[in-house]
Amino acid sequence: MPAIFSTAPGKAILFGEHAVVYGQPAIAIPVTQLKAKAVVQALPLATTGTIHIEAPDINLDSDLSQLPQTNPHAMAIQLVLDTFNINKPPSFLLRITSKIPVASGLGSGAAVAVATIRALSNFLGQPLEDVQVCSLAFEIEKLHHGTPSGIDNTVITYAKPVYFIKGQPIEILSPTKSFTILIADTGVSKATSETVAQVHAAWRANPSEYEVIFNNIGEISKTAYSAINAGKLKLLGQLMDQNQNQLSEMDLSSPELDKLIQSAKEAGALGAKLSGGGQGGNMLALVDESNQASVQSALKNAGAASVFSTTIP
Ligand code: PMV
């Protein structure tokens, strides 16, 4: 039997991170240059029920039976088997590789989960619908984030730009004008679960102040939705700056992020902000043809560990 594989893209959050956990709208885009890949290969000669997992990027090489149930790879496999009520699975090898940096706001955990769920369900001859893939990946996101909004698994499952409100049907965006975003890495990794917990504690301590911030971010996301639909890129850039200010108010920026954001703006970016959990990870800069090259080199000169562009068609 040939190996079955599936890939899933990374993602970036354009607007609304953190506030989305509290019911506000957010906008996210797939980042197709970065991919996670899961390959499932039958092991006909192995002892019945052998399930082996290899993830060389994280030095994992283990039988499923040796992994704790809370391991995200183990959980992805178990969720798929449970979905089909399979108690005696055929023996197989799951091999996972990913070009998406971990703990940097680009959705690596959700992409690995989506690729694994799709590859395994296809291998079992029972391909899952997107809505099922998304909801199983959400269960795994809980391991990574504690209280995830569901935006990562959603944008990655559908691989389209989405306008997302927790618990509501998603809306796929179709921008009237394409736009280009530079994604620059601070080189500092930070677990999203930590910043999500920090915001939660600060909100509990000071609910009225934080609810004003969440509402402000929600309004920014709503206006950004209209700006994307109307192709108003200058306004979109201003909204990114406003969103960044609100994220800074919540202490989610960092000196490295601030430096990259400032240099992108000075080099002519239409707007710039952190993306995802914050306090490290990646930042985004909205550019046009006239300033893309200068912003890109400004980001490199300011110490970005990597810079690449993605265009939303
Ligand atoms: O996975 P990250 O770092 O891109 O962050 C996800 C966005 C948050 O709003 C911070 C958390 C969530 O679950 O929505």
Image (spheres, helix red, strand yellow):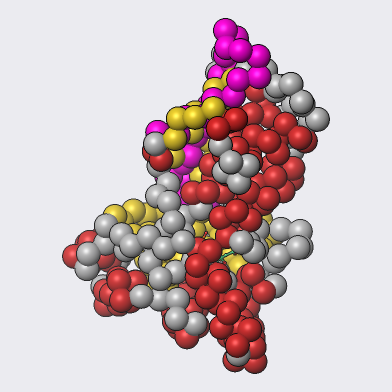
- Would residue 181 appear left or right of 276 to someone viewing this image? left
- Would residue 115 appear left or right of 124 to someone viewing this image? left
Q: Quadrant of ligand 1?
A: bottom right
Residue 119, given in percent of the width and then of the height, sits at 61, 30
Quick one: which residue is furthest to the right in this view?
85
| Residue shown at 70% from the left, 45% from the top | 136
Q: Nearer the viewer, residue 299 or 125?
A: 125
Residue 191 painted magenta:
no
Q: Nearer the viewer, residue 126 or 70?
A: 70
Residue 132, given in percent of the width and then of the height, sits at 74, 42
| Residue shown at 31% from the left, 56% from the top | 307
- Would residue 290 appear left or right of 124 to someone viewing this image? left
| Residue shown at 36% from the left, 75% from the top | 254
Quarter of the rendering occupied by the N terminus: top right
Decide if residue 22 is in sight here.
yes
Quick one: which residue is furthest to the left in this view?
301
| Residue shown at 43% from the left, 51% from the top | 102
Q: Is residue 275 above or below residue 35?
A: below
Decide if residue 230 is in sight here.
no
Q: Is residue 305 above or below residue 298?
A: above
Residue 226, given in percent of the width and then of the height, sits at 62, 72
Q: Is residue 12 above or below residue 91?
A: below
Highlighted range, magenta: 30-56
- Would residue 138 appear left or right of 167 to someone viewing this image? left
Residue 48 painted magenta:
yes
